[in-house]
C-alpha cells in the first residue's frame, strides 16, 4: 500500500529539516527530481494521463525548463518539459496553490513554447503538438471533476475543434466525478494523500525514500527552498 507522508497540521512554521522530512511527491523539488531521474515512473504517469502515449517513447526530460528570452524575473519556468519520439512536447506542472492568474499562466506557457519553437521566417508554422498538464492541489474549475480537458473550439460551432495542436489537461486529485480510468484515479488519490494499492504509487514512494537517503540531494533541497 502506498500513501504519501504528510506534514502534521501541528507544525505551522516548519524548519528546513522538517520540510525535508515531510516533503512528498507533490513538492516541486521532489516531483522534478523523481520525474527526471526515473523515466520509467514518468512514462507510466504520462500513459495514465494520456493513454495514446503508450507506444510513444520519451526522448528527453528537462527539469525547470526556462521558457522565453525575457529578463530572468520574467521567465516562465516549467517543472518538467518532455519531448517524445513522435515530436510531441509535454509540459507538466505540479501546482499546489490556487493562483488568481493560473489560467492566464497556462496560456503563457503554450504561447511562449510556440515562440521558442517557431523558426524565424518559417511560413509553414510546422509546430509540434503541445500539451500542458497541470496537477492541482485544488479544484481548478470548481466542478469536482477529476479531469478537465481544455481545447480550442469555434464559438459558432462548439462541436468542432480548431485542431491547432494545443491542449491543456487540468487534473484534480480532489475530484469526485467525471470519466476517469481506475489507474488514473489511483494516482490522483495518491497525490491527494489517500492510501492506495497501486504498483506505480508504491514505486514512487520507494523512489522518494531512496532520494532522501542522499546527503547531496538533501543539501540541494535546502538551497532550493531557502
Image: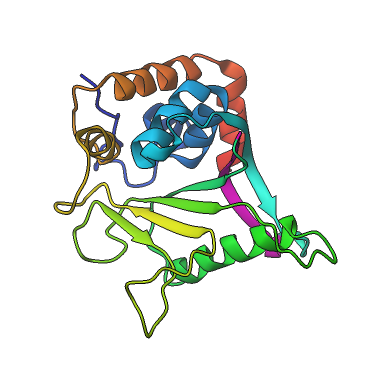
Is 48 on the left or on the right of 194, as rendered? right
Please name the colour scheme applied to the rendered image. Answer: rainbow
Query: Which sits in the foreground, 11 or 116?
Result: 116
Is there any visible trace of residue 45 in the rendered image? yes
Which part of the image, by quadrant, shows the N terminus?
A: top left
Which part of the image, by quadrant, shows the C terminus?
A: top right
In the image, residue 197 sits, relative to residue 154, either above or below, namely: above
Q: Quadrant of residue 97?
A: bottom left
Residue sitting at the far left:
176
Query: Which sits in the foreground, 226 or 88?
Result: 88
Residue 19 in percent (x, y) is at: 43, 35
Residue 108 in percent (x, y) is at: 58, 66
Q: What are the residue bounds of the magenta stretch? A: 73-85
What residue is shown at x 32% (from left), y 62% (from top)? Answer: 140
Q: Main secondary structure of the magenta part?
A: strand
What residue is shown at x 44% (from left), y 25% (from top)? Answer: 41
What residue is shown at x 25% (from left), y 32% (from top)? Answer: 183
Q: Quadrant of residue 71?
A: bottom right
Residue 49 lies within the magenta run: no
What residue is shown at x 38% (from left), y 23% (from top)? Answer: 204
Residue 100 in percent (x, y) is at: 42, 72
Amino acid at each position: 500500500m502506498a500513501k504519501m507522508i504528510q506534514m502534521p497540521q501541528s507544525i505551522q512554521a516548519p524548519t528546513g529539516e522538517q520540510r525535508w522530512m515531510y516533503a512528498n511527491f507533490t513538492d516541486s523539488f521532489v516531483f522534478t527530481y523523481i520525474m527526471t531521474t526515473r523515466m520509467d515512473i514518468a512514462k507510466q504517469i504520462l500513459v495514465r494521463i494520456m493513454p495514446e502515449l503508450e507506444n510513444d517513447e520519451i526522448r528527453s526530460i528537462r527539469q525547470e525548463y526556462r521558457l522565453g528570452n525575457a529578463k530572468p524575473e520574467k521567465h516562465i519556468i516549467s517543472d518538467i518539459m518532455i519531448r517524445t519520439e513522435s515530436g510531441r512536447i509535454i509540459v507538466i506542472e505540479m501546482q499546489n496553490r490556487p493562483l488568481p492568474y493560473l489560467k492566464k499562466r497556462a496560456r503563457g506557457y503554450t504561447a511562449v513554447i510556440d515562440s521558442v519553437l517557431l523558426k524565424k521566417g518559417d511560413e509553414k508554422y510546422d509546430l509540434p503538438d503541445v500539451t500542458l498538464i497541470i496537477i492541482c492541489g485544488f479544484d481548478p474549475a470548481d466542478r469536482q471533476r477529476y479531469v478537465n480537458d481544455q481545447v480550442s473550439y469555434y464559438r459558432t460551432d462548439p462541436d468542432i475543434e480548431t485542431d491547432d495542436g494545443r491542449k491543456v489537461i487540468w487534473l484534480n486529485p480532489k475530484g469526485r466525478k467525471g470519466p476517469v480510468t481506475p489507474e488514473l484515479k489511483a494516482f490522483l488519490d495518491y497525490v491527494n494523500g489517500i492510501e492506495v494499492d497501486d504498483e506505480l504509487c508504491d514505486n514512487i514512494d520507494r523512489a522518494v525514500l531512496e532520494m532522501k537517503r542522499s546527503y547531496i540531494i538533501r543539501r540541494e533541497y535546502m538551497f532550493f527552498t531557502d
